Amino acid sequence: MFKESKLLLAVSLAAAVQPAVTLAQSEAVLEEVTVTAQKREQRLIEVPVSITAISGTDLEQRGISSAQDLSFAVPGLTMHEDGPGQNVIFMRGMSNLYGSDALVGVYLDEAPLTIGIEQLDSRVLDLERVEVLKGPQGTLYGQGSVAGVIRFITKKPELDAFSGRVEASQSFIDGGDSKEAFTGVVNLPLITDKFAVRLAATLEQGGGWQDQPEAGIKNGNNQDLVNVRGKALWQLSDAFTAEAMVVIHRNESKLGQGYENADRTVFVAIDPARVLVPKEYDYDLYNLTLTYDLGGAQLMSSSSYVDHSQVSPYAYKGGPETNFNNLLEGNDERFWKARSFTEEVRLASTGDGPFSWTFGAYYRTLDKKFESYSDTLYNGTVDPTYYYLDIDEWKSYAVFADVSYDLTERLQLGLGARYFEDEQMTFDGSLREEDSFNSFDPRVYASYKVADDMNVYVSAGKGFRTGGFNRGIQPNYQPEEVWSYELGLKGLIADGRAQIELAAYYTDYSDMLRRGLVFVPGGTPPLQQLTSNVGKAEVKGLEGGITWRATDALTLNTTAAYIDSEITEVNATSATNLPGDPMDYTPKFSFTAGANYGFDVGSLPGYARVDYSYRDEVTLVVRSNYPAANLPQRTEPISLVDARVGLEIGAAWVELFGSNLTNQNKWIDPNFGFLNANRTRPRAIGFKVGYKF
C-alpha cells in the first residue's frame, strides 16, 4: 500500500516553485526579507524583536526537514525528543520539562500546533520561510510562548498559474537502512484570479539505524511517514479573501522511543526480547482564515481544529549513575488522544500613518486523554501492571493589543498588553479537580532608525505559562512568569551586501517549576511525582549573525548565541535543584557557519553549499534522580557538517547531499543515566532528482 501511494504521489503531484538551486544574481546585494512576526507585514530589519528568518529555498538547500534539524540551525534553540514527532522545544535558556503547557509556541500559518507541553510535528514542506521569534511573545502569541515562537509560513495558492514539481530522493544511512522520500506539490487555478488550490505532500520510508538484537529487530526505527497538506484560496471580492488548509499526518515506527545506546541499540526493560508497542503518531489539522480589507485596516478571523492520536513505547532504567543504582527499570505503553479548537479574531492597521496597531481576541478549548500501562521492576521484584488514566480539559480566553507610534521619522515607541484566563479540569477516573489561572502580560519597546537600513531597539516584555494539577491532596502548582529585557541592532551594511543582527538580553524567570520523582514500593502508582514552584532563575545572553553577499556567486553566513543561565533561588527543603545550578538543556555557546556558491556548468546553473553547526555541552540537574557526585549530567559538544551540490538541467535538477559527514555519534539529550536520551543521527549520503512544470 505504501509503495502504491509513493507511485501515485510521484506521478500526480507537482509544485509551483523554483527548483532547489540558487542562481547567481547580477548584483551582489541581499534580497529584502519581509516577515509577519508582529501579525502584519514588516521589513525584517524594522521589527523590534530578535528573529531568525530562513527562506524556503535555504531550508531545502540545508536539508532542514524537522524540528530537530531546525534546533541545530538556530543557535540557542534546543529540544527534548521522545521519538518521531514528540518534541518539547526550548529557547534562550528557558528550558523546563515540567508544566502543563509549552515554553515555545509553534504555528503553521495562523494555526497553533501546541497541544500541552508538546508541539505537533510540522514537516518543512513547500514553505515561504520559517520565522523564529526569540524571547517572550506573550502580547501577541499568548501564554505558550514564554521563550519564543516558531512560525512555519506556507506558500499560498497562486490564482493565475498552473505549475508544479515532483521530487524523489534516496539516502544511505551509515550502519543503517536506506531512506526513500517522494515530494510533490501542485498549484491549480480552478477559476482564474478567483479560486485556486495547492496540494503538497511528502512520503518517506526507511532511514532507520537502531537495533534490538534480543528481539531480532534491525533498523527498527525506520519510519513510514505520510504528510499531506491542501490549501484553497478564494478571492471572493477585491476586499474579501478566504483561505482553507487541511493537513493529514501519519507516521509509524517499530522502535519508536527515539532513545538509543552508543552502539545504536535500544534498551527494553525487564525482558530485553520483549517487542514494545510500535510508535504511531497521527493528526489531522483544519484551518479557515478569513480576511477583509476595510481600507486602512484588515479584519481577520482564524479558526483551527486539531485531532491528534498517539501510541508510544517508553522504557527506562535507573542506571549506576542514578539514585536507583540499577534497582529500578520499567516499560510503559502510552496512549494519547487530543482535540483542540482555537479561534482568533484581530483587527490590524494597514495604512502608512504614524500609528500602527493590532487588537484581537483569542479562544481555545483543549481536551486530552492519556492512558498508560506500566510494568515496573524494583530490587528484583516485578510489580503488577499499573494502569494510569488522566483526562484534562482547558478553556482559555484572551484579549490583546499592540500599538506603536512614530514620534519622528526615526523614533518609534510601542506598547502592548494581553489579558489571559485559563480554566482547567483534570480527572483520573475517581477524583475530579478544577482550577483557574490568569495573567496580564505587558510589553514596551522603542526603535530608533540610525540610518535608512539600520535600527536600534530596546524592549521589555512579560511571558506567562499557566499552572496545573498534582494528584490527590497535593497542592496545585501556580503559573510561571518571565520578564525579559533586550537591546538589539539590525540592518544592512556595505551597500546592501551584508545584513547584521545583534542582541543582548536579560531574563528574570520567577516561580520556576520543578518536579521530583519518588519510587514507593507497593504505591499507586509505584512512581510518584510532585510538580512545584520552587524558585527563580536568571538568564543573560548575547546573540548575533551576519549574512554577506561576498560576490555575485558567493554568500557567507554565520550566527552565534552565548547563554549564561543560573538558578538563583530555591524555596523548597527537598528540591530538584539548588542555587547555582545551570538551566537544563542550555548550551553555553552555539554557532553556525555556511557558504553557498552559485556556478555555471556551460549553460547549466548550479550551486554548492557547506553548513557547519556547533553546540556546547548541555546539562541536566535532577537531584531527586541523581546523587550530587554525578551532577550535572552532561553531553559532549557536538559539531555537525552538511554539504550539498545541485545542478539545474532545463526543467529538471539533480542534487547530491551529505549530512553529519564526520559521522558524529554523541548524546543530544543529557538524560542518558535513565537511558532516556537520543543521539546524533548517523552520516547519510544521498541524491535527489526533480522536475518542474
Image (cartoon, grey):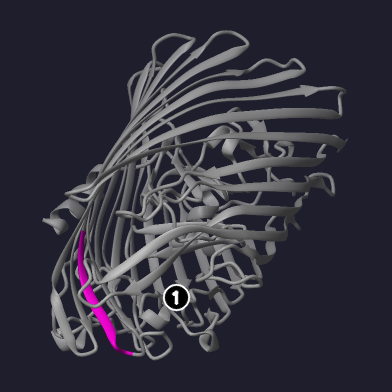
Picture coordinates of residue 340, whole percent (x, y): 31, 37
On screen, 149 above or below 176? above
Which element carries disc 1, helix, strand or loop? loop
Q: Nearer the viewer, residue 81 or 45?
A: 81
Left or right: 94 with respect to 182?
A: right
On screen, 254 above or below 399? below
In the rendered image, is residue 608 in sight? Answer: yes
Residue drawn 17% across the image and 51% down it: 5
On screen, 549 above or below 41? below
Check the picture and name the quadrant holding the N terminus. bottom left
Left or right: 15 with respect to 53?
A: left
Write down the residue under mark 1: 624
In the rendered image, is residue 647 in sight? Answer: no
Q: Nearer the viewer, residue 36 or 188?
A: 36
Picture coordinates of residue 404, whole percent (x, y): 73, 24
- Amino acid at the residue labelled 1: Ser
Magenta segment boundaries in residue numbering = 326-334
Reply yes or no: does residue 369 show up in magenta.
Answer: no
Picture coordinates of residue 107, whole percent (x, y): 45, 41
Left or right: 110 with respect to 53?
A: left
Picture coordinates of residue 413, whole percent (x, y): 79, 28
Residue drawn 55% across the image and 8% down it: 294
Tell me where residue 86 sits by quadrant. Answer: bottom left
Secondary structure mainly formed by the magenta segment: strand
Counting every numbered tag in the picture gives 1
On screen, 170 above or below 67? below
Q: Residues within 10 Å of mark 1 (few under 14, many from 20)?
A: some
Q: Nearer the viewer, residue 47 or 95?
A: 95
Reply yes or no: does residue 330 show up in magenta.
Answer: yes
